Image: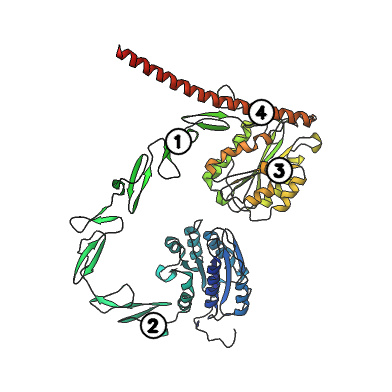
Amino acid sequence: MEKGVALKCRTGPLDIVFVIDSSRSVRPFEFETMRRFMMDIISNLDVGPNATRVGVIQYSSQVQNIFSLKTFFTRADMERAINSIIPLAQGTMTGLAIQYAMNVAFSTQEGARPPHKRIPRIAIIVTDGRPQDRVTEVATQARNAGIEIYAVGIQRADMSSLRAMASPPLEEHVFLVESFELIQQFAKQFQDKLCGVDMCMEQEHGCQHSCVSTPGSFYCECNPGYRLNVDGKTCSPIDACADGRHGCQHHCVSVRGSYSCRCRPGYYLSHNKRSCTMIDYCSFGNHSCQHECVSIPNGHYCRCRSGFTLQPDGKSCRATDLCNGVDHGCEFKCVSTEGSYHCMCPEGQQLQADGKTCSKCGAGHVDLVMVIDGSKSVRPQNFELVKQFVNRIVDLLEVSPHGTRVGLVQYSSRVRTEFPLNKYHSADEIKKAVMDVEYMEKGTMTGLALKHMVEHSFSELEGARPLSHNIPRIGLVFTDGRSQDDISEWARRAKESGIVMFAVGVGKAVEEELRAIASEPVEQHFSYSADFTTMTHLVENFSLNICPEEGKGETEIRSPCECEALVQFQTNTVAILQSLTEKNILWARSLAQMTARLEELEKQIANKK
């Protein structure tokens, strides 16, 4: 224990871990206030190996340990470490931070005293925003594990999320500080709550009638016949609204021994002077909605009729994209036109007579290994969409023992070969095996998955054909989030070993990691979709490269000049056909309009006769 410091915390040792929000929404001066908040609390603690131990972690989209419960035992060392924190400035994964605190920060390996010593374990979560992940379940687990959670929200914090995190009773563990400027004043009150100081005795409470102490806080009470005012300190005689018989629908306001009713914003008081009616903003006639206007409290919004979509201006409507609104059945790509649509195939494939399916990728043979993310963040329903995505790619291939071979690997915190390259010999077998794959959950060890792919998946033991056979090796990595391990080394080794690497990202996938995985030219070897439900369009980005013109067989080597000329010819031909198709559609519309006009003129002439 440090000498010369007047200590206030005399209730015995504690294990305290600060969980600090350093997301991008926390501005630099606000983060400095958080530092001051931590140091103000630590300054009054009796710290030491046998007294109170302190740890600090910060979080955004990831969790970073600043120092653990066993690292420092002097306030000076702690303050130096706190002053050296560099904010992460990313998302707000509060649930992930609580999970880390429970599993790591409060472990005996990191310095927490064993449970049998009954040293209180206290987590102080300081955040300014809404969590981007779920906190209720993990917070419940932490509390059940014996961790007492204080939730301190600042400015924009979501009160329901704070209440979901905190320990009961909530009124003693949930705090909402209105500004960062007030958090330092709040630190002293919070310190006293931790240390059990009698607040009524410790400071000037300002209660008009009486002060009642609670653990770490206080509240004011009024004498019988009085009620506490909104300032929480002064008292006033009970008014006419207090007996609950006023009948006001929204608000009752006392006026000199009587009362009057008032309505919330967006409502007006009815003739009975008690009930409230919502203001119909649409009736003012200035909404400019193309189709329908819908009134809500404090305003209105525009709505489109069925079959139309509201435009970004919030007022006009446009016919719904039929590619999204109907079961178009296009195997590869649906292209919307006004009131209609047509199907397209990837470059190098022909649209079949049914107008929906495409010719198979039979020209080139490859060894293709797909590595799919099975981490917890993907979620079961989205994992099913991932499997459908894999099968869309399989549909493009001519699978056979001497043609294209396909292998599948799933990873989370570990890696599992679902089936190697030499397991199945037809597309139907592969597609059935894909749909039978079970979701792994847990972490996101993408680097470990790349290592497994290089060392095992493309080995001759698992079905990869020898490099001397000139069969292209293609690796396609699918992920929905940031890797929890380093990917750079094995991404480099994969490409150095001759594997053409593709990277597919969805949701919270990190573009920097996708680019590190992808082969050159990077822009042609990685793709991203914001949502699982719309990711099927990514198949288009890979179809040409997974179906190379070269490498037809195990011995054939084609002229690069010949390939390049064929590809250029095919590209030009497809562009010309598409242009002609669009012109024919416009010509057909014009012809239909002219025909309708002629029929109308003929009717007018007949009527005149």
* Residue 69 seen: no
- Which quadrant of the view contains residue 465? top right
| Disc assigned to residue 200 | 2
Q: Are marks 1 and 4 in contact (CB under 8 Å)?
A: no
Q: Are marks 2 and 4 in contact (CB under 8 Å)?
A: no
| Disc assigned to residue 572 | 4
- Answer with mark 2 or mark 4, whichever residue precedes in sequence: 2
Q: Nearer the viewer, mark 2 or mark 3?
A: 3
Q: Secondary structure at mark 3?
A: loop
Marks 3 and 4, how far apart at CA: 22 Å
- Residue type indicated by callout 3: Pro
In which quadrant of the rendered image does the N terminus lie? bottom right
Marks 1 and 2, how far apart at CA: 65 Å
Q: Are marks 2 and 3 in contact (CB under 8 Å)?
A: no
Marks 2 and 4, how far apart at CA: 85 Å
Point out residue 265 in the picture as x, y percentages from the top left corner: 31, 58
- Answer with mark 1 or mark 2, whichever residue precedes in sequence: 2
- Answer with mark 3 or mark 1, whichever residue precedes in sequence: 1
Near mark 1 (Cα within 10 A), the count class, few <14, some 14-19 or many ≥20, is some
Near mark 2 (Cα within 10 A), the count class, few <14, some 14-19 or many ≥20, is some
Looking at the picture, tell me which residue is in the foreground, 531 or 477: 531
| Disc assigned to residue 519 | none
- Answer with mark 3 or mark 4, whichever residue precedes in sequence: 3
Q: Secondary structure at mark 2?
A: helix
Is the residue 205 above or below the residue 114 in the image? below
* Residue 339 seen: yes
Marks 3 and 1, how far apart at CA: 36 Å
Residue on which disc 1 sits: 320
Total numbered circles: 4
Q: Nearer the viewer, mark 3 or mark 4?
A: 4
Marks 1 and 4, how far apart at CA: 31 Å
- Residue type indicated by callout 2: Cys
